[in-house]
Amino acid sequence: MKLLHIDSSARAISISRRLTAQFVEAWKRNHPGGDVIYRDLATTTIPAVTDDWAATFADPATLTPVQKAYLSISDELTAELQAADTIVIGSPMYNYSISAPLKAWLDQIVRMGKTFAIGAGAPFGLLGDKKTMVITTRGGVYGPDSPTAALDFQEPYLRAILGFIGVSDLTFLHVERQLKPEAEIEFAAAAAQINELAK
């Protein structure tokens, strides 16, 4: 068993990092022989998608050294994702959406022939066997019954793009009110759930 542990907070000491670390510890207790692949997106240099990205649609045998160099980080990130049985992603909410490092990672791992393919004129995902936990941290409240629900561009986007590459076993744990007096209560409740979810 392999777990891919992804942190995406720009802050070295963050709530999402604390919670993903707890998930990893609980997972390791449940899978003592399992391996953990760790990827800190805030310290990974991820190139922007440019015209060179067209190389992802070319025959690998025809790639130039420059194209191979450009795609090397994408190949590395995609291989980590393909190798994992379980994925945990820490995703703080920034300006109602995801962090820039997480968006950059997603841009690199949505790859034709690696994480999705085209069949009968329509795309389909190739990663359907990955159990994925997304732990979000939010200063306010954005649940479906809240006045600010329409401002949540975090879960809908992550659910859509991860679903596009075939991740159907997807669980979200929203740790909200982290800028409010109830922050510690919300954190403790989330921590208790993580111990049950990391199986």
Image: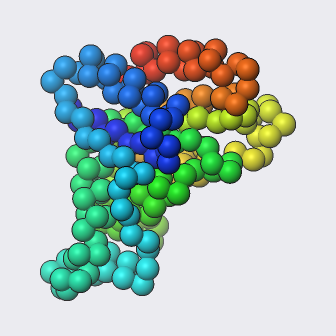
Q: Name the residue located 50 percent from the left edge and 48 percent from the top edge.
A: 10
Q: Is residue 74 visible?
A: yes
Quarter of the image where the C terminus is located:
top left
Q: Quadrant of residue 133?
A: top left
Q: Position of residue 93 (x, y in %)?
A: 61, 44
Image quadrant in which you'd find residue 47? bottom left
39 in relation to 197, above or below: below
The residue located at (42%, 31%) in the rendering is: 20
Residue 52 x/y as whole percent: 36, 82
Q: Is residue 106 visible?
A: no
Going by the image, does 86 lie left or right of 149? left
Query: Relative to 35, does residue 155 appear above or below in the rendering?
Result: below
- Relative side of 139 to 74, left or right: right
Q: Position of residue 63 (x, y in %)?
A: 20, 83
Which residue extends farthest front?
Answer: 12
Residue 31 figure quarter: top left
Q: Is residue 133 above or below residue 108?
A: above
Left or right, residue 38 beside residue 43: left
In the image, residue 182 lies at what x, y percent? 70, 19
